[in-house]
């Protein structure tokens, strides 16, 4: 029954009743304030009354609304606007938390006061009091029916909306927490993926290095065997050399003995030459004397004349022989002198040869000693090379085992990479569902929605950087938003955030939020430039500042900031 005419007929508010109400309006205008004071004083004594009804300013607003409404009723302004205003009163009281029991009881109190005022005014005139009391009762019930209908409808809507809002509120927390957990897990997976890829790459390199090492061990082992064989041959050659050196020493001893003997013989020959020289000297003397005798004989033969001619011939022959002997002795002396000079040089050479042989004997002795030392060293080296060869064989076997294990690790690393990637793809689906759920929650009036969603945004920001490091997403630093353009930044610098300006957590939020974006953009720039380690260092800073941002956001949430 929404039509005003139908309602007036149903509640018997005809022209007579409206006229009675209008006649009583001046009395109402004079007495409405005390009646309303009694009403609100009475309900303030009830247990569990809302705090809003204890505030003087709120009471004045409610009283003013009530006063105007009762003036409208007693003025008989029953039209569609009256229905809307009456319905609005019921809605306002519902918003203030006044229950139907309190509202009806309070309304009954006002009606009682109004009827008491009628009896007080027209107590001696029942013909005026009765129609007026009936009109007041009908108007009060009409007003109560409209306001209570609005009260119940709005209460139902409020309850439903409140229930939905409470559900959305709790769902928002769960969605934000789930988003943060999923994204933190994705960040961890991205980090694991990056680490596994690094391990996989390192393992492949280690496997290749070990394979090369095994090949190197094999080559060294082969070379060691060859060196050992060569050392054995060198040892044999050294031993042969020692034997040859000993034989050479013996031969040089014999040569030295022979030279000494020859030197002795040369000395004897020199003495003999000297004796021959002495003999030649004697012969020279004899030849000189013979020559002198021949000269004398010739002189005497010349003196003898003819008789001495034969003697002169003999003397001439003797002189010729003496001359010949003298020349022969001169030649012999010259040859003996030459022989003696040669013998002297031979003696010197023989002495030098003897010294050289002696020196050679010393050198050969040193060579023999050195060759003996070399032989010992070669023997030790040969034994060491044999030991090295054995150790290398063991190392080759161990390296083969390590190589097999490393290859197994490499295969496991490759599988782990694929498993983590599959896990991250699955988590991306969860992230997509959470994002859709968060978008649905935008339709609800959820307290601190921007602040709460900002927590999730920060983890998503870190996740994108982690995905970049893992090679799952490419980012352009020039396209990334700074701290003023993201969801949190737009709210932070908007009029909507004014209610937070007085709180220290709000003021403290700006710097770490700015650092999160600055270091994130720098991480992307470094990564794109090939500096992965530098990018990881910047992401670590993002994580540090992001945790501070989330802590401050939690502080704002705990303070129930709108």
Image: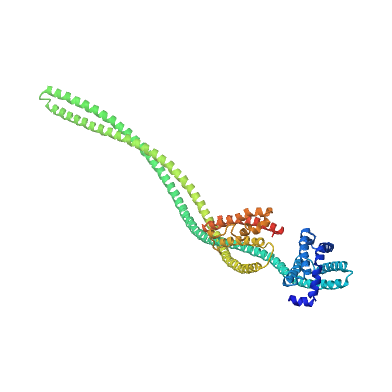
Q: Foreground: 38 or 467?
A: 38
Q: Foreground: 504 or 275?
A: 504
Q: Quadrant of the N terminus?
A: bottom right
Q: Quadrant of residue 405?
A: bottom right
Indicate the position of residue 46 as horizontal and vertical percent values: 84, 64
Residue furthest out toward the top: 303
Indicate the position of residue 524 as horizontal and vertical percent values: 55, 58
Indicate the position of residue 33 as horizontal and vertical percent values: 81, 62
| Lateral position of residue 91 relative to residue 453, left or right | right
| Lateral position of residue 486 relative to residue 99, left or right | left
Q: Quadrant of residue 159?
A: bottom right
Q: Residue at x 18, y 26 (%)?
A: 294
| Lateral position of residue 325 relative to residue 196, left or right | left
Instruction: Classify 140 as above or below 535.
Output: below
Instruction: Classify 449 as above or below 324.
Output: below
Q: Quadrant of the C terminus?
A: bottom right
Indicate the position of residue 454 as horizontal and vertical percent values: 64, 61
Q: How many marks?
A: 0
Q: Note whether residue 551 is visible.
A: no
Q: Residue at x 60, y 56 (%)?
A: 516
Q: Foreground: 470 or 514?
A: 514
Q: Quadrant of residue 533?
A: bottom right
Residue furthest out toward the right: 124
Q: Residue at x 48, y 48 (%)?
A: 374
Which of the colour schemes (rainbow, by chain, secondary structure, one colour) is used?
rainbow
Q: Note whether residue 448 is visible.
A: yes
């Amino acid at each position: 029954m929404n039509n005003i005419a139908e309602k007036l007929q149903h509640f018997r508010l005809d022209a007579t009743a409206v006229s009675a109400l209008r006649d009583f309006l001046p009395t109402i205008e004079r007495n409405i304030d005390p009646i309303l004071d009694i009403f609100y004083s009475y309900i303030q004594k009830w247990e569990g009354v809302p705090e809003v009804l204890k505030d003087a300013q709120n009471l004045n607003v409610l009283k003013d609304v009530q006063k105007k409404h009762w003036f409208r009723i007693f003025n008989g302004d029953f039209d569609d606007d009256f229905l809307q205003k009456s319905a609005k009163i019921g809605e306002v009281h519902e918003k203030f938390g006044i229950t139907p029991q309190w509202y009806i009881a309070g309304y009954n109190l006002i009606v009682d006061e109004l009827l008491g005022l009628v009896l007080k005014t027209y107590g001696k005139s029942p013909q005026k009091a009765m129609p007026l009391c009936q009109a007041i009762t009908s108007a009060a019930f009409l007003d109560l029916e409209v306001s209570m209908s609005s009260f119940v409808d709005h209460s139902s809507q409020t309850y439903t909306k409140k229930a939905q809002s409470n559900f959305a509120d709790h769902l928002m927390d769960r969605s934000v927490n789930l988003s943060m957990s999923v994204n933190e897990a994705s960040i961890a997976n991205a980090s694991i993926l990056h680490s596994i890829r690094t391990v996989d790459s390192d393992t492949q390199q280690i496997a290749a290095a070990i394979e090369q090492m095994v090949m190197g061990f094999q080559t060294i082992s082969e070379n060691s065997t060859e060196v050992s064989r060569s050392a054995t041959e060198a040892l044999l050659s050294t031993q042969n050399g020692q034997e040859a050196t000993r034989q050479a020493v013996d031969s040089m001893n014999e040569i030295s003995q022979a030279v000494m003997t020859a030197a002795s013989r040369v000395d004897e020959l020199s003495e003999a030459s000297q004796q021959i020289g002495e003999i030649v000297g004697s012969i020279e003397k004899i030849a000189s004397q013979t020559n002198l005798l021949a000269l004398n004989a010739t002189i005497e033969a010349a003196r003898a004349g003819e008789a001495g001619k034969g003697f002169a011939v003999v003397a001439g022959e003797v002189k010729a022989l003496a001359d010949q002997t003298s020349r022969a002795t001169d030649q012999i002396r010259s040859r003996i002198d030459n022989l003696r000079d040669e013998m002297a040089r031979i003696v010197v050479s023989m002495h030098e040869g003897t010294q050289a042989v002696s020196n050679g004997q010393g050198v050969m002795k040193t060579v023999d000693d050195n060759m003996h030392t070399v032989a010992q060293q070669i023997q030790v080296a040969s034994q060491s090379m044999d030991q090295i060869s054995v150790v290398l064989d063991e190392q080759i076997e161990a390296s083969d085992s390590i190589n097999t294990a490393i290859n197994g690790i490499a295969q496991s690393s490759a599988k782990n990479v694929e498993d983590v990637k599959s896990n991250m793809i699955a988590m991306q689906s969860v992230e997509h569902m959470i994002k859709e759920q968060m978008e649905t929650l935008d339709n609800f009036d959820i307290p601190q929605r921007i602040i709460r969603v900002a927590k999730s945004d920060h983890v998503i920001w870190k996740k994108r950087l982690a995905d970049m490091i893992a090679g799952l997403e490419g980012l352009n630093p020039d396209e990334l938003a700074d701290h003023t353009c993201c969801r949190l930044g737009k709210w932070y610098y908007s009029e909507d955030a004014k209610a937070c300006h007085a709180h220290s957590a709000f003021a403290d939020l700006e710097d770490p939020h700015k650092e999160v974006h600055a270091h994130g953009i720098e991480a992307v720039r470094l990564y794109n430039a090939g500096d992965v380690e530098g990018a990881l260092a910047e992401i670590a800073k993002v994580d540090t500042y992001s945790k501070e941002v989330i802590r401050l956001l939690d502080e704002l949430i705990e303070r129930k900031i709108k």
